[in-house]
Image (tube, rainbow, N blue to C red):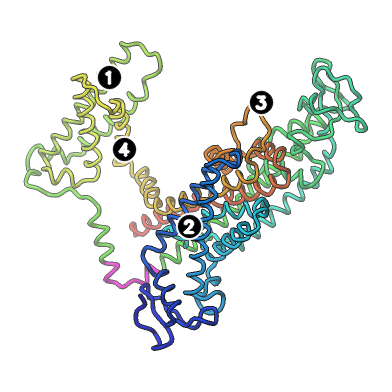
Amino acid sequence: MVRAAAKPGEDAVGRSGRVYAGKSLFLFGARSTPRKQAISIVESPLFDPFILLVILGNCALMAWNSPLDPPGTQKAALIGTCEHVALAIFTAEMVVKVLSFGFVLGRGAYLRDPWSWLDFVVVMLGIVSFFVPWLGNFSIIRAARAMRPLRALKRVPGMPLLIESIIASFGQLLNVAILCALSFIVFGIFGVELLKGKLHWRCAAPGFDGVGDMDFPASDEFDSEEACNPDAPSCADGSRCVYFEEDPGADTVSFDSVLKASIWVMQAATFNDWTDPMYLSMNAYSPWVLVYFLPVVCVVGFFVFNLFLAVVYDEFKRGAEEEERKTAEQSEEDREAAEATTDSAEPLLVPAAADLSLCGRVARSEALNRVSTALVVLNLVLMCMPYADQPEEYERAIDQAETVISLLFIVEMALKLLGLGCSGYWSDKWNKLDGTIVLLTSVDLVLSATGTKVGVNVSFFRILRVARMFRLMRAWPALYQVCSALVGSLYQISNILILFLMMNVIFALLGMQLFGGKLPLDDGEVPRQHFDYFMPAMLTTFIAMTGEWNETFQACAEGGGFWAAMGYFTALLLVGFLVLANLFVAILAEAFSLDDDEEGGGGE
């Protein structure tokens, strides 16, 4: 339903308070029946959750589908039917929003929202591929299907703001990217001038009896992947130094052109197997090629690529300062209430009459805390001592020592309960951690003593004792400060993790569309990193995002085409390795800077 209008007879106001003005599609006014019904649907509290559910279901179907699935099966028919249903729902969503908000003209129109651009492109490409099925085989159509999970980001709390901050940094990131590209070009030119054609000369495997020169290159089946210098052959076992048509690594380890040389520069910048091309070049040309390779690593890897981190951190810090400015504009009453809430959240020992007792003084004493800290350290040392195939006497001695320490912690808990009272004990955050571990340890001791068999592995309770190390923060303020900064950034890190996971899903689906079933076999078997199915594709994409990408890139270039692999891995490294990974560092750096500011303010 639509509530009272802002202008009687002209505009309308929805449940969310949004004003719907003017005419949609030049036909439907805010008070017209079709538009009122569309507004009611869009404003419904069930609308966004339903669309999100359809998006997630559609992503699950895309993950279930594999490029290796044969056509004409029941699985293929089910996936096709569900795809058509999802397309119909997404089309209906777009139509309802266009009818409610307007298409282009007017404030708040459908295409005025950047998030709607993605929806519009995906839906329109889906409609085109539905009516012209053969177009669905084009890479751009298949790539658009992989973009569908991005639509879910808008509906994750706090995610639109994070995406907007990333988009806001695109200007500076573009400048860094241009500098990076210029560095690639400069070092690529040097590499081409120095090493072009050198890596074609490699030692032939035993059994080769051909010519092996530039006019009659050797067959790849005799390629040993060991570079050599034809003017000073150094091949082992008397094998010949011959010419091969392609460079090593399926023609990806090459300095024959600036573009191919840039691939190695990217390897050096990400520190991924960058020494292999260097050693090949040293064998093929001269050991003095170090004067080329080492500056590339230092300039591009240590300096240029870290500029991405600087830009991401600067933009994130600006966003944090803007958020802090908005928070500072709150009323004095709200700030005092927030401070009161924060102060009350700090657990304090509750004074009690028992404090006057001997147990109370012992429970509050610094000596007990020191003894407890020493026991925690000793407990950690004991937990590090077991090893495989250890003697039974050794194992028994460690178990007995751990049992003694556990009993001492139980005695400590009993003293504190007697001295502080139950409410005083459990009101302290450290005692909550301690008491929980002691109770679980008591369960472990009882089960071990009675020999009771339970569904949960008894060693699980023992592993939980490791949590006692957090008690060290009580006696180590610097460690407590570090952990506090980490805890304070968990909310922002959780959003980055969701975005990282979503990008992982998108690139995995895109990799399945581009390289599924195309990678060359490794000794007759599918390589560990491939895109044939969703879970291996997720793992492959994650590994590439961490910087280990070159081996998979070579396989994709050989099986799926050089340009497809080049475009895919460039985008993957730019988004995953240079932007999202650096966001983690930016969040932690900002958390530590805020923590230092608070400490400095507290000391004034």
Q: Give the residue drawn at x 45%, y 64%.
A: 321
Give the residue at mark 1: 399
Q: Is residue 600 left or right of residue 298?
A: left
Q: What's the distance in space between the residues labelled 4 and 2, CA to CA?
A: 39 Å
Q: Magenta includes 302?
A: no
Q: Which badge, 2 or 3, comes first in the chain's sequence?
A: 2
Magenta highlight range: 326-336
Give the residue at mark 2: 153
Q: Give the residue drawn at x 30%, y 18%.
A: 398
Give the residue at mark 4: 472
- Dividing the picture into quadrants, the one containing residue 176 is bottom right
Q: Is residue 245 left or right of residue 366?
A: right
Give the residue at mark 3: 524
Residue nearest the observer in this picture, 71 or 242: 71
Crowd band around label 1 with a 10 angstrom C-alpha radius: few (<14), some (14–19), many (20+)? some
Q: What's the distance in space between the residues labelled 4 and 1, CA to CA?
A: 23 Å
- Residue 542 x, y percent position in the rendering: 54, 42
Quadrant where the N terminus lies? bottom left
Q: Which badge, 4 or 3, comes first in the chain's sequence?
A: 4
